[in-house]
Amino acid sequence: MSVKQDMIANDACARKKPDMVRLTTGIPGLDEMIEGGFPFPSVILLAGSAGTGKTTFAMRYLCEGAKQGEQGLYFTTLSEPTQWMLRYATQFDFMDPAYFNDQIVYCDLGDKLREMNENELLNMMEEKIAEVMPQRIVIDPITVIGNFMKGDYRQFLFDLTNRLKNWNATTLMTGEVKPGEIYPPEVAYAADGIVLLILSEEMGARRKYLEVLKMRGTNHQTGKQSIDISRQDGIVVLKARF
Ligand SMILES: Nc1ncnc2c1ncn2[C@@H]1O[C@H](COP(=O)(O)OP(=O)(O)OP(=O)(O)O)[C@@H](O)[C@H]1O
Ligand SMILES: [Mg+2]
C-alpha cells in the first residue's frame, strides 16, 4: 500500500464513529425506535400524566437488566413500602419477585425528602449507588422531589444528573406532567433523552401513545406510536398497521 493509500485508509478509520453502548429497554417495539436501546451512560426522562404506565415501564426496564445479569436500583419518592410496590408489580409476567432479593435494590426516599437538604439527599443517593453499583437506576417519580425542595430545584437536578452519569449508569427518571404541560420542564432541561407516555381522548375512546421526543446521539423514530398495556408484557409499542 502506498503512503497516500495508507493515509486514506487511516483517515477512513478515524472517521468511523465508535458504536455507542446501549441498554435494551425490554419494552417490546421500543428498542427498534432508538437504535437498539438507551445510550449508556445517560439520563432519560419518562414523562406522563397519572396512570399512563410510567412505573410499569420502569419495572420492565429494571427486570430486563436483571435478566441480563445487571444490577438495578429503584429509588421511589412516594414512601411506599416494598411489599406495596411488589403487590402491583408481580401482576406482570415479566416480573420475578426473586430479582428484589438481589439484583434490584429498592430504596424509599420518601421520608428522607422531608428531613434532608439538597446536599444531604445527593450524598445519601450516591452512597446507595456506591453500595449497589447499578447499571440501571430508576427514580420514580423525580417530580415529587421538586415539591419538597426548599432550595434551587434546577441546580439540584443539574448536580444530580452530572453525578449519575459519572457512576456509569443509565438512569430513568419518571416525571408527572401537570395539566397543560407535555413534560416537566426543569427535568427535561437536564435529561439526555425524553420519552413521553400520552393518554388522549379520541372520539370518546381513551388511547395511549408513546413518543420519543429527544434521544442524544440517536437517530430515533419520531411521532406518536400506539401502545398497549398487558399483563404479559407490560407496555408494548404496537407496530403501525397500514
Ligand atoms: N394487567 C394490566 N392490563 C392492562 N392494563 C394495565 C394492567 N395493569 C395496569 N394497567 C394499566 O396501567 C395503569 C397503571 O400504570 P402505572 O402505575 O405504571 O402508571 P403510572 O404512570 O406510574 O401512574 P402514576 O402516575 O399514578 O404513578 C393502570 O391505570 C392501567 O390502566
Ligand atoms: Mg407510578
Image (tube, rainbow, N blue to C red):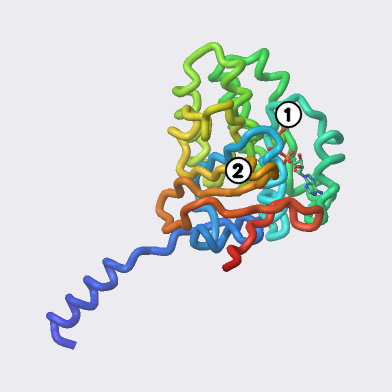
**Residue 78 seen:** yes
Residue 236 place in picture, x, y as percent: 68, 56
Q: Nearer the viewer, residue 176 or 16?
A: 176
Crowding around mark 2 (Cα neighbors within 10 Å: few <14, some 14 to 19, many 20+) is many
Which residue type does callout 2 highlight?
A: Leu
**Residue 133 seen:** no
User: Which labelled disc corresponds to residue 197?
Assistant: 2
Disc 1 marks which residue? 108
Residue at 46% across / 54% down in the picture? 222
User: Can you tell me whether the CB of the residue at mark 2 lies under 8 Å from the nearest atom of ligand 1?
Assistant: yes
How many numbered discs sit on the rendered protein?
Answer: 2
Residue 140 place in picture, x, y as percent: 66, 34
Q: Looking at the rendering, which quadrant does residue 26 occupy?
A: bottom right
User: Which labelled disc corresponds to residue 66?
Assistant: none
Q: Earlier in the sequence, mark 1 or mark 2?
A: 1
Please state if 205 lies on the left or on the right of 120 as rendered: right
Residue 121 place in picture, x, y as percent: 60, 22
Which residue type does callout 1 highlight?
A: Asp
- Location of the N terminus (image quadrant): bottom left
Residue at 68% across / 49% down in the picture? 62
